[in-house]
Amino acid sequence: MYRMIILHGRLTALLLFAALSLQASSQGTSVTGTVTDHRGVSIVGVRVCQTGSANCTATDISGMFHLVMVPETESRLTVNCPGFTTADVEIDESTEFPVKVTLIPMYLEAEKWEDETELIPEANVITRSSIGFDAILTDFSEFTALLGSHNTEAMNYFAVTGPEIGASFPRFYTGFGIGMGYNYKEDYDTLVVDLKNTLFKLSLGYDIISSRRIRMTPIVSLRLMKSRLRNYPGERKVPLEEYLLKKETDLRFNQAMAVAGLNLEYLMYSGNRGMSDYWSFGIFGGYAVKLNRVPWIRSDGNRITTNSAIRLNPLTAGISISYYSAPK
């Protein structure tokens, strides 16, 4: 009786092992891989199917996919994405995993990319030249008692336009920009209120979405906001006694801040060959934090101290038009 129980147990284990082996073999090959464009940038949402079947999957945010092949069906993958030429990949015993699939944009001429080694340009750096508009809502009300409302009201809005030069690496961006504000000049009683705004910024970003038409980039930037306020007599000829009585005001306010936000670009191609030459229109929204509690103030030869602060509306916005180009 004891021998029968042992024999029955061994037979059951053998049958279970055979069943598991049969099930594993019936599931087919498990295929993993990545999909990128010809620059090496991962593509999200690419449809990857076993050719001739409804067995499909899609790439994730990193461009990766996983697909279990159905037995007795073609051992080939069909990879397609709107705006790109469809790619076919043969899967056999010699295939190395993860499979690397490169999709070519349809606007590129096929004969230009006959050699797969040419899919990624030699230049991995793309330069960016842009012109942008940045707006920051400021509040100089704490200086009203000292400077007068005619000055602080003029300073309560900070807007600049200017160029930015940067470089894009695969998914990374860094740039430096200078913005110049319009020259505000207004007569107040016998004085002229003269205001000039300037902005310097250093930006770092990383593309979380980079498709043929849309690019979404979180950006962190360091900014230095500079405002120069001058008051001087409005008359062309001023007696010396009056000039000394109404001494000219010349103050330079400097406020540092950090801004974190999101830049969204729509890409427009100029028809040139290669992915590197294109235009973009972008909008930016961010949140600003002051780095110095009170502004650094300077005048001719003097550093001015104060306990008054510039208040900031933390929400900032901007727009830009950019041109991207890679060295040929």
Image (cartoon, rainbow, N blue to C red):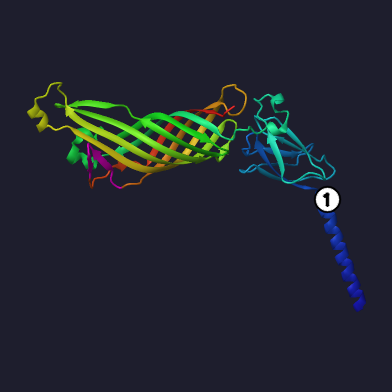
Q: Is residue 64 left or right of residue 261?
A: right
Circle 1 — which element?
A: helix
Q: Give the quadrant of the C terminus.
A: top right
Residue at coordinates 83% horizontally, 50% vertically from top-left?
26
* Residue 54 x %, y %: 76, 39
**Left of 190 or right of it: where is 308?**
right
- Farthest residue to the bottom: give it: 2
Which quadrant of the view contains residue 288?
top left
Residue 30 on the magenta span: no
Check the image and report above or below for 252 versus 67.
above
Mark 1 crowdedness (10 Å alpha carbons): few <14, some 14-19, many ≥20? few
Q: Which residues are magenta?
A: 293-304
Q: Quadrant of residue 78?
A: top right
Relative image position of residue 104 (x, y in whole percent): 67, 31
Q: Is residue 312 above or below residue 103?
A: below
The residue closer to the viewer here, 39 or 57, is 39
Q: Amino acid at mark 1?
A: Ser
Query: How many numbered circles does the render carry?
Result: 1
Question: Which quarter of the picture shows residue 309?
Answer: top left
**Left or right position of 269 against 162:** right
**Which residue is depicted at the point 63% across and 43% down?**
60
Q: Is residue 5 above or below residue 221?
A: below
Tell me where residue 210 appears, x and y as whole percent: 58, 36
In the image, farthest residue toward the front: 301
Q: Nearer the viewer, residue 297 or 153?
A: 297
Percent across and percent down for residue 106 are 66, 27
The residue tagged 1 is 26
Image quadrant in which the N terminus is located: bottom right
Image position of 183 (left or right of 9): left
Residue depicted at x 91% and y 72%: 7
What residue sits 39% from the left and 32% below the top? 178
